[in-house]
């Protein structure tokens, strides 16, 4: 599914989704929030453990990892280093000098995939 379908949703679809959201059970949102919080915590613990201090945006399904001490001149080079070394993909999210200090990792994955990513990224060093 193309990212634009859910990031830049057409207005009629937004109205339909708004109605259906109001009809969901409140505990559905609580369960979803708890699930994402557990995923975020699990992944950030691993990042901390290996020295890639995470920065956690509010209300996001990704974290930013501090990578300025890694090989490479740009965030793209550093993201590729992580990918080549561990098989875990992060992306170059920012542009400019400050952006070269961070790569972005999504934790919105199925638990077995996130577990595998956590295991693999620990092999970075």
Image (cartoon, rainbow, N blue to C red):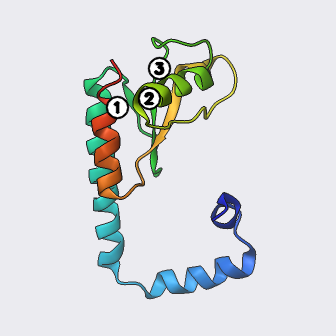
Which of marks 2 and 1 precedes in the sequence?
2
Cα gap from disc 1 to disc 3, whole angstroms = 13 Å
Q: Are marks 2 and 3 in contact (CB under 8 Å)?
A: yes
- Residue 33, quarter of picture: bottom left
* Image position, residue 95 (x, y; %): 69, 27
Of the pair 98 and 93, the residue shown nearer to us: 93
Relative placement, left or right, of 69 versus 26 is right
Q: Secondary structure at mark 2?
A: strand
> What is the number of the mark on residue 121?
1
* Image position, residue 109 (x, y; %): 40, 55
- Within 10 Å of the Cα at label 1, are there few (<14), some (14-19), or many (20+) other Cα atoms? many
Cα gap from disc 2 to disc 3, whole angstroms = 6 Å
- Residue 11, quarter of picture: bottom right
Q: Which residue is mark 2?
A: 65
- Identity of the residue drawn at 30% across and 56% down: 111
Of the pair 8 and 3, the residue shown nearer to us: 3
Which of pointers 1 and 3 indicates the residue nearer the eye? Answer: 1
- Identity of the residue drawn at 46% across and 14% down: 70
């Amino acid at each position: 599914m193309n990212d634009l379908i859910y990031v830049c949703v057409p207005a009629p679809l937004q109205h339909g989704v708004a109605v259906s959201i109001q009809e969901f059970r409140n505990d559905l949102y609580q369960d979803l929030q708890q699930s994402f919080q557990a995923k975020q915590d699990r992944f950030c613990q691993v990042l901390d453990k290996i020295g890639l201090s995470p920065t956690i945006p509010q209300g996001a399904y990704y974290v930013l990892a501090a990578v300025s001490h890694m090989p490479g001149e740009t965030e793209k080079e550093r993201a590729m280093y992580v990918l080549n070394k561990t098989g875990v993909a992060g992306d170059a999210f920012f542009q400019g000098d400050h952006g070269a200090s961070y790569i972005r990792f999504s934790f919105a994955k199925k638990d077995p995939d996130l577990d595998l990513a956590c295991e693999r990224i620990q092999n970075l060093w």
